[in-house]
Image (tube, helix red, strand yellow):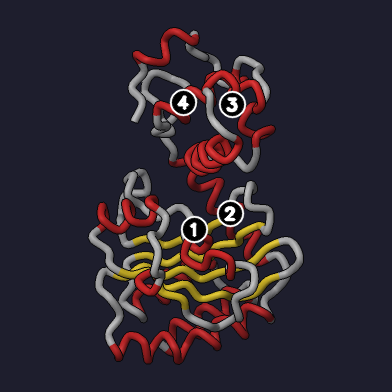
């Protein structure tokens, strides 16, 4: 564990890649997947995530590529104290169905979230996924390192996270399945609802018109868009629309039912 913390410090000072720090951290605390996530205070914006997962195949749909901090911390997501530990198993009410699905498909039982720091625009978290609920020894190890990870994060080199995120995003794009987002092979694995939203945006419809055409509320569209941004490696609606209209082949509205949509 000492070596993992040392690697974390090296990473934050620009002497090692963040990916290596997360690999060592996962090994040191026996985690299945670890992520550093930056959540914008604007809930409609997509979080930025740098992660390490024990799954070897980067195209495996079960791989960790998102943040679950917001549904676990709820109203405290922007108020949590750096270095504290929040466990998904301690949440009394139902957690995000996406987290439940992720844990079920991966055979995971616990998510530990450690707030790292915040500013006026965003909040940073370390998110750790475990196969089993934490025993007393696991709690002790996590308690021992959480405050150290948060304090060293506060002293990191400016821009270290963004640099790691951009490198990770480019690597993901380079390894992604080729083909247009709305192609028949559905490379982004869009759901039927997400596919319809993308299709309408590609035809020039505004977000308001999309809601009216689909008969959905604003919050439902926001949820669809967050999922689409995640699956297409885009940051906002402008980038998504640009990507959609840049694709060479966009199916007609009538063809969407025949597409292979997840």
Q: Earlier in the sequence, mark 2 or mark 3?
A: 2
Tell me the residue at 58%/66% (across/down): 75
* Element carrying mark 2: loop
Callout 2–callout 1 Cβ contact below 8 Å: yes
Q: Which mark is residue 67?
A: 1
Q: Quadrant of the C terminus?
A: top left
Q: Nearer the viewer, residue 223 or 241?
A: 223
Nearer to us: label 3 or label 4? 3
* Element carrying mark 3: helix
Tag count? 4
Q: Which mark is residue 195?
A: 4
Answer few, some or many: residues within 10 Å of disc 2's Cα (few below 14, many 20 plus, some between 14 and 19).
many
Q: Nearer the viewer, residue 63 or 157?
A: 63
* Element carrying mark 1: loop
Q: Is residue 156 above or below residue 58?
A: below
Q: Is residue 40 left or right of residue 110?
A: right
Q: Quadrant of the N terminus?
A: bottom left
The answer for how far apart the CA atoms under marks 1 and 4 are is 22 Å
Q: Is residue 69 above or below residue 201?
A: below
The answer for how far apart the CA atoms under marks 1 and 3 are is 26 Å
Q: Earlier in the sequence, mark 1 or mark 4?
A: 1
The image shows residue 224 at horizontal and vertical percentages of: 51, 37
The answer for how far apart the CA atoms under marks 2 and 3 are is 23 Å
Q: Which mark is residue 47?
A: 2
């Amino acid at each position: 564990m000492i070596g993992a913390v040392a690697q974390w410090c090296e990473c934050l000072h620009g002497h090692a890649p963040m990916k290596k720090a997360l690999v060592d951290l996962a090994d040191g605390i026996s985690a299945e997947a670890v992520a550093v996530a930056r959540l914008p205070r604007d809930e409609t914006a997509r979080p930025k995530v740098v992660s390490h997962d024990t799954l070897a195949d980067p195209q495996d749909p079960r791989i960790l590529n998102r943040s679950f901090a917001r549904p676990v911390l709820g109203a405290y997501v922007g108020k949590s104290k750096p270095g504290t530990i929040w466990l998904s198993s301690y949440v009394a009410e139902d957690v995000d169905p996406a987290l439940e699905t992720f844990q079920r498909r991966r055979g995971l039982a616990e998510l530990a979230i450690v707030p790292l720091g915040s500013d006026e625009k965003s909040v940073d978290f370390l998110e750790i996924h475990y196969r089993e609920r934490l025993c007393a020894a696991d709690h002790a190890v996590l308690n021992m390192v959480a405050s150290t990870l948060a304090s060293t994060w506060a002293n990191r080199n400016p821009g270290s996270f963004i640099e790691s995120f951009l490198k990770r995003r480019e690597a993901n794009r380079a390894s992604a399945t080729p083909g247009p987002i709305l192609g028949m092979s559905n490379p982004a694995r869009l759901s039927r609802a997400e596919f319809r939203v993308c299709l309408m945006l590609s035809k020039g419809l505004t977000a308001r018109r999309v809601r009216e055409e689909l008969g959905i509320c604003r919050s439902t569209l926001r949820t669809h868009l967050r999922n689409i941004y995640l699956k297409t490696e885009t940051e906002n609606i402008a980038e998504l629309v640009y990507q959609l209209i840049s694709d060479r082949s966009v199916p007609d509205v009538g063809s969407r039912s025949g597409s292979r949509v997840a």
